[in-house]
Amino acid sequence: MNQSIETALSVSNICKSFGSVQVLKGISLDAHRGDVISILGASGSGKSTFLRCINLLESPDEGRIVLDGEVIEMKHNANGRLLPSNTRQVEAMRSKLGMVFQSFNLWSHMTVLQNIIEGPLRVLKRSRAECIEEAEQLLHKVGLFDRRDYYPAHLSGGQQQRVAIARALAMNPQVMLFDEPTSALDPELVGEVLRVMRSLAEEGRTMLVVTHEMGFARHVSNRVVFMAQGVIDAQGTPDELFEGLPTERFRQFVASHNQRAND
Amino acid sequence: MDLLQLLSFGEHGWGAALLKAAGMTVLLTLSALVVGALVGSAVAAAKLSRRRIFRYIGDVYSILFRGIPELLVIYLFYFGGATVMGAIHHWFGGEGFVDTPPFLVGALAVGLISASYQAEVYRGAYLAVAKGELEAALAIGMTWGMRIRRVLIPQVWRYALPGLGNVWQMTLKDSALISVIGLVELMRASQVAAGSSRQYFTFYIVGGACYLILTGLSGRLFNIAETRVQRTQRRNPNA
Ligand SMILES: Nc1ncnc2c1ncn2[C@@H]1O[C@H](COP(=O)(O)OP(=O)(O)OP(=O)(O)O)[C@@H](O)[C@H]1O
Ligand SMILES: [Mg+2]
């Protein structure tokens, strides 16, 4: 029983194919409260697909998702496809999973402040005054209070990503999902976003982070998962992986990354 | 009579009649635009549908309404409407010829033509919307209705505005065709004034000038709306 309270998110045996290509071949992962899990892997190894299956932006062909002790109801339809059977439940679940995208995806017709209050105001149906007050605190936290009335197009990539993180935080999610949050940024803007993410980790937020930032994986996360060809090839604490180099594939991955860093 | 007298608002002038007719033209065009917006967005949705049957229906709609001359569409609606209404009338025991209300027929006919053009505008606008923004709305837990209202429509609207300006102008000019079924709008009023005063050239020039004023004014309004909407897109907020 204690187990289910400690476990924020538990996914098991996620399988997903696109056409005849099986991208995920049965992935299982448990995130305990306060876990910061970095998900590494070569391009095309299925990291984004896995993350998108968790909040059902993609429907997995197989698998089970439990958020906060609640099993997400899914049923096989007439064609044998597995589909979520309770739209309300899926919407509620998504509101508890904060997603941060590689390409920010801020709503371009809304100002920074409007972007941040939209979710709590419309989805959680909280009062506008309360939403604005909290949004302003979040803007201070990500260092963008003076940009509250700007439109996304008027901000740098790093600023947009910090707004996107604030937008996700405004929902006070159980778990945050990051899909390569710094990959679309100019190198000099990566630091400001990583700093915000590090502060979230230190506050004890539960986070799943798909990333190519080895520094973040090694020094900020408490667990590292390495995906290769649709399966989890290796996982453990950062030290177990980076010092132990348990598998040949992971060794190669680290070597190629070091190579790139030295180039 | 000199021009001022012809256009005066007094007993022998045509000013009041023309002004009223211009109002009718605007009203007709607005109604047609609303009909066109409702039907046009449905047609656009059909064309974008994953289901082949809906795409087919959308394409057939475009072929019909863009391939048949506008005037013919109006006649079809007018006389078709008369036949249908007559049949209903006789069914309930009525007799004789039933008139179809020209405003209704006009708004419907011009509106359905306008819909075929608006459908293309909405379809293009939908395709221009950044799909990531819709996905972000999904990921935050919005319902279908919220995603449509809060994200899709404002974005489609933004991309559709320039195209809608063109459609509005076309629809405004198409509304002149409704003069053939006896609705006294700007075109018809110019004809009547021209015929009664035998000042054909004068009144057609005046009619033309009125259309130019209407298209010019509405073009201005669309430009203002566009600048307001584009403000969110410019890189420098103070520019
Ligand atoms: N919607 C889709 N339709 C078809 N194939 C897809 C789709 N999405 C992903 N794929 C394929 O699935 C595989 C895994 O993609 P995914 O985006 O999950 O990889 P990734 O590990 O996130 O890679 P990257 O580091 O480049 O982001 C790739 O081969 C990709 O081409
Ligand atoms: Mg990816």
Image: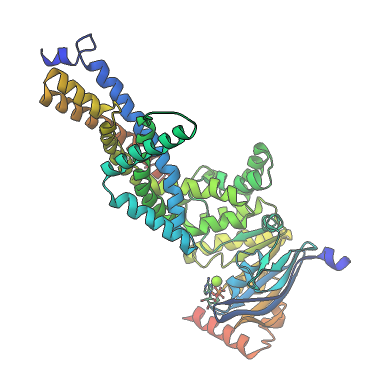
Q: Is residue A141 left or right of residue B214?
A: right
Between residues A173 and A184, which one lies in front from this camera angle? A173
Q: Residue at x 62, y 60 (%)?
A: A99
Report whether residue A48 is seen.
yes
For this view, does B180 lie left or right of residue B122? left
Name the outermost residue toward the bottom: A248
In this rendering, is residue A111 above or below A258?
A: above
Q: Position of residue A214 (x, y in %)?
A: 60, 75
Q: Please say whether residue A158 is visible from this viewpoint.
A: no
Which residue is the extreme one toward the right?
A1
**Taking B123 as reference, is B9 left or right?**
left
The quadrant of the rendered image in which ligand 1 is seen is: bottom right
Percent x, y for residue A217? Answer: 64, 73
- B198 up-or-down from B53: above or below: above
Q: Residue at x 33, y 26 (%)?
A: B24
Image location (x, y in percent) of residue B234:
39, 48
Question: Picture coordinates of residue B205 (x, y %)?
Answer: 15, 27
Return the residue nearer the eye: B73 or A166.
B73
**Nearer to the camera, A21 or A216:** A21
The correct choice, above or below, for A221 with respect to A151 in the image is below
The quadrant the N terminus of chain A occupies is bottom right
Snapshot quadrant of residue B178: top left
Between residues B185 and A112, which one lies in front from this camera angle? B185
